[in-house]
Image: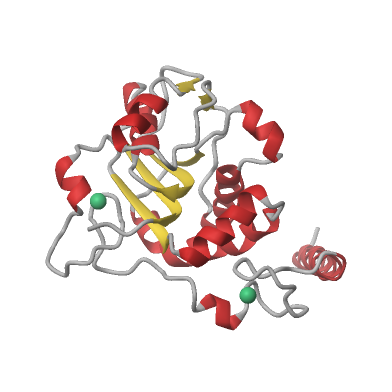
């Protein structure tokens, strides 16, 4: 095919994608991920006022877990000074504040899978420079147990990872890591209880992973126990560097 022929083919494909998106917007109007109101047609992914309710993680942040620090002079949070993490570093886009908490709750439990679009765009915009600088070979979403997956209908970490894969041009790997224990929700547990809860919760489908640097994708970073458990497995199978990239994280002291 001639160069012009190729270009016009691409133009037609782009137009068809655009038409599909416009039609989808009309049939399923986008909702704001913070207040859940329907957004104006082709008017962005979040209300302007609600965008102000979300807080991006800025410096100073912990060099290990990436959570925002209150102290201007500290390099690590109190938690990372007392615990030796197995993962190398974590990066988060937002602070897990009230607005983010409500948003994630509807995303996971209120049938608002569509919020993933805003989350992915934000994570890519906020984190791309740091993520690219790590030269990762793959994105690995934290898996859900199949029982929980069948109740929810989707794995939020997988949605984020596949969107980020397209945005950042990094392949996503889903078959490598499995969740074999349907662990109790971690929210109310102490660090020690989380560790116990997660022991042997995951398994790898291969004991020889031919990757040097990977990024584990999840929605929330709390104590890092999940990331540590996964990093322990991956490093045991030959991966050299395991990083985390999460939608949000709490504030640390
Ligand atoms: Zn809103
Ligand atoms: Zn930390």
Q: Is residue 114 left or right of residue 89?
A: right
Residue at 32% across, 59% down? 251
Q: Left of 181 or right of it: where is 71?
A: left
Residue 38's x, y, as percent?
75, 73
Give the residue displayed 30% in from the left and 55% down from the top.
66
- Residue drawn 81% across and 63% down? 13
Using the image as rendered, state which of residue 113 and residue 211 is in the foreground: 113
Residue at position x 71%, y 39% from top? 153
Do we see residue 124 in this rendering? no
Q: Nearer the viewer, residue 92 or 239?
A: 92
Ligand 1 quadrant assignment = bottom right
Quadrant where the image shows the N terminus:
bottom right
- Indicate the position of residue 154 as horizontal and vertical percent values: 67, 41
Q: Height in image: 5 above or below 173?
A: below
The picture quadrant where one finds residue 72 is: bottom left
Residue 15: x %, y % from top left? 82, 70
Determine if residue 37 is in view.
yes
Q: Quadrant of residue 46?
A: bottom right
- Percent coordinates x, y for residue 214 in the rendering: 40, 40
Quadrant of the image containing the C terminus? bottom left
Judged from this view, the residue extending furthest toward the front is 188
């Amino acid at each position: 095919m001639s160069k012009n022929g190729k270009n016009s083919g691409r133009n037609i494909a782009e137009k068809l994608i655009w038409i599909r998106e416009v039609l989808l917007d009309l049939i399923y109007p986008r909702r704001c991920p913070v207040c859940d109101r329907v957004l104006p047609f082709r008017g962005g992914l979040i209300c302007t006022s609600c965008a102000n309710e979300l807080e991006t993680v800025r410096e100073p942040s912990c060099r290990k877990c990436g959570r925002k620090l209150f102290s201007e002079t500290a390099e690590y949070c109190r938690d990372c000074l007392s615990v030796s993490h197995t993962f190398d570093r974590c990066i988060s886009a937002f602070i897990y504040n009230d607005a983010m908490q409500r948003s994630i709750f509807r995303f996971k439990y209120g049938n608002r899978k569509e919020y993933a679009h805003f989350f992915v765009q934000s994570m890519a915009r906020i984190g791309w420079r740091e993520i690219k600088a790590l030269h990762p070979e793959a994105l690995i979403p934290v898996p859900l147990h199949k029982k929980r997956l069948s109740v929810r209908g989707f794995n939020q970490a997988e949605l984020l990872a596949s969107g980020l894969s397209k945005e950042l041009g990094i392949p996503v790997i889903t078959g490598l890591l499995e969740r074999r224990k349907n662990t109790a929700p971690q929210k109310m547990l102490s660090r020690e209880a989380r560790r116990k809860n997660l022991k042997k919760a995951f398994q790898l489908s291969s004991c020889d992973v031919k990757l040097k640097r990977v990024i584990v994708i999840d929605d929330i970073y709390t104590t890092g126990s999940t990331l540590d458990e996964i990093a322990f497995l991956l490093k045991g199978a030959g991966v050299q560097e395991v990083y985390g990239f999460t939608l949000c994280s709490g504030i640390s002291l």
